[in-house]
Image (cartoon, grey):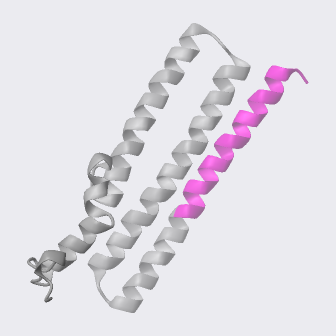
Amino acid sequence: MTFSEAMEHVAQVFEAIGALVLLVGLLFCFTLAVRAFRRSGDGRQAYQVLRESFGGVILLGIEILVAADLVRTVAVATTLENVVILGLIVLIRTVLSFSLEIEIEGVAPWRRAMVGGAGRIRQAMAKGGAEGIGPSNLPK
């Protein structure tokens, strides 16, 4: 067995693992959604659980499939055409991953700090009617 043949098999293993992650992940996500529905009785919450969990599974599957493409391109058939095709595949998958992250988290990465930590506390205070509470407004 030559090096190229071995690396082709490695790439095929990565592809099989990626497909398995997607399939098992889908089943797991459906299980989580059904459990969420049984607990809450709210279909919207179950759908949200399904969406968020399967979005994470898709991101993981994409990363594994990109690894398969990298192995195949770098170790098996290193031609300019294959490198350009790999670049396009990685670009498309990167845009897809970026879009999925925004969809899952509900916020763009550059705005993530506004909804994390202090931003979430500020939002909770506003929802609770405590906008004016802060160190400068505490009783002395």
How many dots with numbers? 0
Seen in the picture, residue 54 relative to 109 is either above or below; the reply is below
Q: Is residue 46 left or right of residue 136?
A: right
Q: Main secondary structure of the magenta part?
A: helix
Q: Is residue 14 magenta?
A: yes
Name which residue lies at 45% across and 65% down. 53
* Most distant residue in the right direction: 1
Name which residue lies at 17% across and 79% down. 125
Q: Which residues are magenta?
A: 1-25
Q: Is residue 82 left or right of residue 39?
A: right
Q: Is residue 111 left or right of residue 51?
A: left
Percent coordinates x, y for residue 71 in the rendering: 68, 29
Percent coordinates x, y for residue 72 in the rendering: 67, 26
* Most distant residue in the front direction: 140
Q: Is residue 4 left or right of residue 23?
A: right
* Most distant residue in the top direction: 80
Choose top left, top right, bottom left or bottom right for residue 68: top right
Name which residue lies at 57% across and 36% down. 66
Q: Quadrant of the C terminus?
A: bottom left
Seen in the picture, residue 136 relative to 89 is either above or below; the reply is below
Choose top left, top right, bottom left or bottom right for residue 36: bottom left
Percent coordinates x, y for residue 94 in the rendering: 43, 36
Name which residue lies at 35% across and 77% down. 46
Seen in the picture, residue 121 relative to 17 is either above or below; the reply is below
Percent coordinates x, y for residue 35 in the rendering: 46, 84
| Observer-nearest of 115 and 10 | 115
| Observer-nearest of 97 and 14 | 97
Q: Quadrant of the N terminus?
A: top right
Q: Is residue 86 magenta?
A: no
